[in-house]
Amino acid sequence: PFPAYRANKRKWLYALALPLAGIPVSAFPARALACDTQTSHRRKGICVFVPFGDQNPIKRIRYQYVTISLIIANVLAYLLEAAGGSQAAVISSFAVIPSEFVQVLGTGGAAPGSAGALAIPERVTLVSYMFLHSDFVHLAGNMLFLWVFGDNVEDAMGHVRFLVFYLACGVVAALTHALMLPDSLDALIGASGAVSGVVAAYLMLHPRGRIW
């Protein structure tokens, strides 16, 4: 079963906030997270949790249409990205690159990218980056969490508000990352920020939900 949110509130907030800030969970001291491993010399660990389902049926909506639509959109975007043959150009065009974003922060235009990149306004990349993934494992991990936790959050919020909430979480995650690392040339892609917001909402709505 999933640990009770109330009993481990600070630990779960750390685990959810770190990905939003672009910091891998494994880089944080294990004692601040929700799981540890004990060695004979020192404490170290990586918090790993892979959900497959929950015992929490939806009650207010007939079906999780937005959750399924987001999963389909991410899968289609990944297939198009893989079939395009030029992943570097796609990422350079549609990913959030902090240094480029900060460069045109006041104007809202498109920053000069690498050769072959499209001139996409940086504001647009705050949304488009969520639908790009580096590989199948990256995509599968995010979509699995969205599948398990998204339906109950959509059930609580309703279809439209859930979609707005999901996109808003992704935008806030990208802005946080860009403003914390304004000189970075590394591209930010993936739905992790948006999905982290969904997981946080689930924990607040169902702190004693059972996950398997």
Image: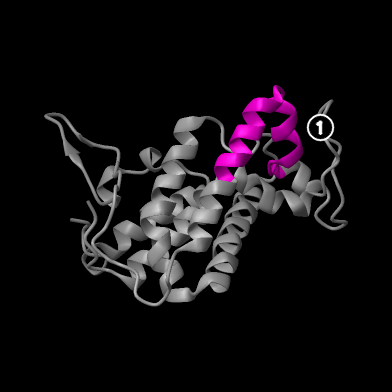
Given residues 93 and 52, the one toward you in this image is: 52
In the displayed image of the protein, which residue is found farthest to the front? Answer: 62
Q: Is residue 131 left or right of residue 135?
A: right
Give the vertical position of 21 relative to 82 (above or below).
below
Q: Nearer the viewer, residue 99 or 206?
A: 206
Magenta residues, dominant SS class:
helix
Horizontal side, residue 119 vs residue 127: left or right:
right
From where the camera sits, is residue 21 visible? Answer: no
Label 1 packing within 10 angstroms: few (<14), some (14-19), many (20+): some
Locate residue 80, reporting x and y percent.
Answer: 66, 34
Image position of 107 with respect to 158: above or below: above
Q: Which residues are magenta?
A: 74-98
Residue 210 seen in render: yes
Residue located 68% across and 48% down the image? 128
The image shows residue 151 at horizontal and vertical percentages of 41, 63
Q: Secondary structure at mark 1?
A: loop
Q: What kind of residue is marked 1?
A: Ala
- Residue at horizontal 33%, vertical 65%? 203
Q: 160 or 65: which is nearer to us?
A: 65
Quadrant where the N terminus sits is bottom left
Work out which residue is located at the far left of the displayed protein and give it: 40
Residue at the (49%, 31%) spot, across then down: 136
Q: Which residue is mark 1?
A: 117
The foreground one among 70 and 23 is 70
Question: Is 161 placed above or below 23 here?
Answer: below
Q: Is residue 165 left or right of residue 9?
A: right
Q: Is residue 155 left or right of residue 108?
A: left
